[in-house]
Image (tube, grey):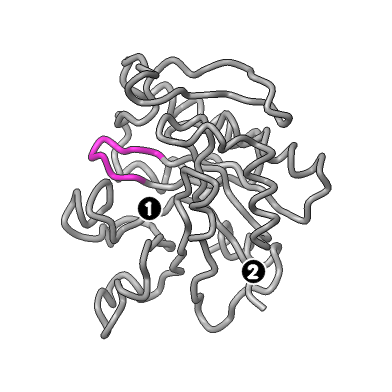
Amino acid sequence: MAISYDLHIHSCLSPCGDEGMTPPNIANMAALLGLDLIAVTDHNSCRNAGAVMAAAKAMGLPLTVLAGMEVTTAEEVHVVCLFPDLPSARAAGEEVESALLPVKNKPDIFGRQLILGPEEEPLGEFERLLINATSLSIDDMPGFAKRYGGIAFPAHIDRPSNSVFANLGYFPDYLDFPIAEVWRPEEFFRDGAHREVLEGRVILKDSDAHRLEDMKEGGPCPWPETSPETVEGFLEVLFGG
């Protein structure tokens, strides 16, 4: 049986994320949905990922949590980056945060950017607006993730905004993206459409959840015929190519 996963979840650190997306709430909802593996991928920051990991561990949940982030490139394309451990994610997050425009968040307009501990204890608010574009190009993304032992893949490529097709007009085959995230794969690949994306790539279907109820929209999505049946096998495909 294939692993049930959701590798694109926002916490209350993302200004567009609901304040109910706290570390214990995310971990508990993932467990209720029967997910084996999740990733916390806030906009341009990894600061709440460790708290979700700690919350899941403290509650004894059968859940593996990855640290990641959804980077907004200079082209305003969203790219998910995932990392094999928390120190790597934190180091990568520092680089991305330093590449953000120096624009302060306006919580009354964009929402608060809450940094929380594993028991929802407030640790602060991130001051710069996290949904802005960074100075990192989409061309930088595969190499950037690899420097920290991670993997990068274009997010929700079939959406009408902040996707490779919406913003670039094509899928960047010249870049090393062995994975693509598709929001509605059944529609996107219907009748043999977009074979150039499907060929030779793993396709993920994630929720891009900003609210707890959104998490039910996550995976699994059909993998190649040799589908991983353990979290370890899934991670080997993910990080080992």
Q: Say which residue appears at 61% left-offset and 36% top-offset.
A: 49
Q: Residue at x 32, y 22 (%)?
A: 109
Does the magenta-highlighted stretch encompass residue 76? yes
Where residue 20 appears, as percent x and y from the top left, is 56, 36
Residue 96 position in % (x across, y down)? 43, 29
At which x and y percent is residue 86? 65, 37
Label disc, if present, on residue 3 of the rendered structure: 2
Magenta highlight: main SS: loop
Whether 15 is among the magenta residues is: no
Answer left or right for 118 relative to 173: right
| Quarter of the image that includes the N terminus | bottom right
Seen from the viewer's position, the closer of residues 197 and 20 is 20
Q: Residue furthest left?
A: 169
Q: Is residue 123 above or below residue 168?
A: above
Among the 4 quarters of the image, the one containing residue 185: bottom left
Q: Secondary structure at mark 2?
A: loop
Q: Residue at x 71, y 63 (%)?
A: 232
Vertical relation: 121 (above or below) 86:
above
Residue to which mark 1 is pinned: 155
| 9 to 228, vertically: above or below | above
The amino acid pointed to by label 2 is Ile
Q: Is residue 59 left or right of residue 142?
A: right
- Which mark is first along the chain, 1 or 2? 2
Q: Does residue 160 lie above or below 139 as drawn?
A: below
Amino acid type, label 1: Ala
**Residues rendered magenta in the picture:** 71-78
For mark 1, does the 10 Å Cα neighbourhood hold few (<14), some (14 to 19), or many (20 or more) residues? many
User: Could you tell me how far apart the alpha carbons at marks 2 and 1 are, in whole angstroms?
Assistant: 20 Å
Q: Is 173 left, or right, of 218 in this rendering?
A: left
Which numbered circle lies on residue 224? Answer: none
